[in-house]
Amino acid sequence: MEVLVVGAGPSGSVAALALARGGARVRLVDRASFPRAKLCGDTVNPGALSLLDRLGVGAAVRAQARPIRGMRVTGPGGAAVAADYPNGLVGGAIERRVLDLLLLEAAVGTGVDFTPGIRVLAPVRDAEGRVAGVRIRSAAGESEMRARLVIAADGRGSRLGAALGLTRFARWPKRWAFGAYFADVDGLTAHGEMHVRTDGYLGIAPLGDGLANVCVVRDASHGPVPAGPAVVAAAIGADPGLSGRFSRARRVSPIVALGPLAVDAAAAGCAGLLLAGDAAGFVDPMTGDGLRFAFRGGELAAEAALLELATGRAAHPGLRGAFQREFGSKWRFNRALRTLVASPRGVQAAAALASRWPAPFRLLIGAAGDVRLVGVRPR
Ligand SMILES: Cc1cc2nc3c(=O)[nH]c(=O)nc-3n(C[C@H](O)[C@H](O)[C@H](O)COP(=O)(O)OP(=O)(O)OC[C@H]3O[C@@H](n4cnc5c(N)ncnc54)[C@H](O)[C@@H]3O)c2cc1C
């Protein structure tokens, strides 16, 4: 086999799709069977949706998604401000179990050979130290899978990336996420919601008919993160702006916890292996653009792999540069926003300012939504 893609989340499926379209023989494996759930805010921003349009899967995703016209942000002192994306652009709210299956089906439809139920345990290296495949566990027991190139799209805290010394959990920030679905939530609109508080933030994505995805993120620098399911109920119950809207609501899924969230990457791969999506580094879901990095990161990893297959030259140094060029300015934007949000006084001041002077806030929402990718300047 030419290329083995590990992980059939958005970055793995997009990488596999792009590789197959480029003429490579591709095998895609995942430990899970699909459809499967994944903790996420379930929001695809307008820029990320436009990438799916270009890949030819945008129409299928839009058909299943609830349109999101912009964002509503509230601050700790009760300040609230909302803005639409410019030019009538929309993003989409869609459950990950639905989105990821659509992308996987598109990859399989392009000729990708997909096998679920394969847990990758470790990289396998040849005598020169180059990655030549992976060690796996399946229903049939433990064995090896060999490939000319491996793409590790195995998500945040990538097992392959960590084993090769390419990624590790960051010392800072230390944030945890807790998420669940709630039915019968009142006051949902066509805006995604971000409620920034002094001890973290809470995001709400409206999925239609009163169903909402609720994600709570807590920062350990504000004190110990409370354990378990109580976090979400406490975050809603203690918040006067939210508790009334959840008075009729029922939690309709288990609460999933994840953390610490941030993972640093030292490189985009090594000889024989390339990283894609969250496996190539993850900081914080606040700006809701992980899926854009996953779609485009998968595509870039596929382009790099096709180049290496054609020329025999190692592609991972070039992939690192491509990530920097494509994502560098958005990473800086996200870092600045996180620094602001880490300061309770900063949040209060920004929320109060935005409710009186909304123009910079609209700019922020456009930038967070990656509207430049659609050829629109945030304004
Ligand atoms: C709380 C939270 C909210 C978020 N909200 C948003 C949002 O609203 N919008 C947005 O754009 N982004 C959001 N993100 C980010 C987004 O979820 C990720 O960026 C995205 O899932 C990355 O896709 P991926 O394919 O790289 O990884 P994943 O989606 O994590 O897929 C990795 C796949 O690899 C498989 N796998 C893992 N290990 C192995 C193994 N050892 N062997 C075999 N298979 C394996 C997994 O089963 C999985 O299917 C959020 C993230 C969090 C944590």
Image: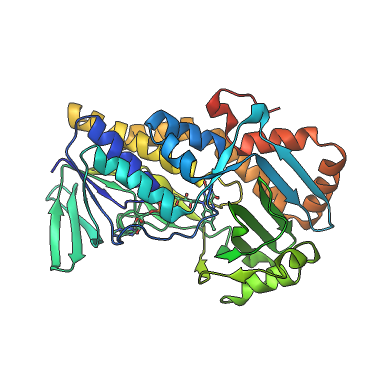
Position of the C terminus by quadrant: top right
Q: Nearer the viewer, residue 200 or 184?
A: 184
Residue shown at 51% from the left, 45% from the top = 65
Q: Which residue lies most toward the right here?
A: 356
Residue 94 shows in the view = yes
- In the displayed structure, does residue 150 sit left or right of residue 210? left
How many marks overall? 0
- In the displayed structure, does residue 144 sit left or right of residue 299? left
Q: Is residue 306 above or below residue 34?
A: above
Residue shown at 83% from the left, 51% from the top = 79
Position of the N terminus by quadrant: top left
- In the displayed structure, does residue 247 sit left or right of residue 33? right
User: Quadrant location of ligand 1?
Assistant: bottom left
- In the displayed structure, does residue 221 sit left or right of residue 109? right
Give the x, y percent position of residue 367: 63, 34
Q: Nearer the viewer, residue 370 or 167?
A: 370
- Picture quarter containing residue 241? bottom right
Give the x, y percent position of residue 330: 57, 37
Q: Is residue 107 above or below residue 279?
A: above
Give the x, y percent position of residue 191: 67, 45
Residue shown at 14% from the left, 54% from the top = 145
Residue 315 shows in the view = no
Q: Is residue 165 above or below residue 59?
A: below
Q: How is the image coloured?
A: rainbow
Give the x, y percent position of residue 67: 58, 41
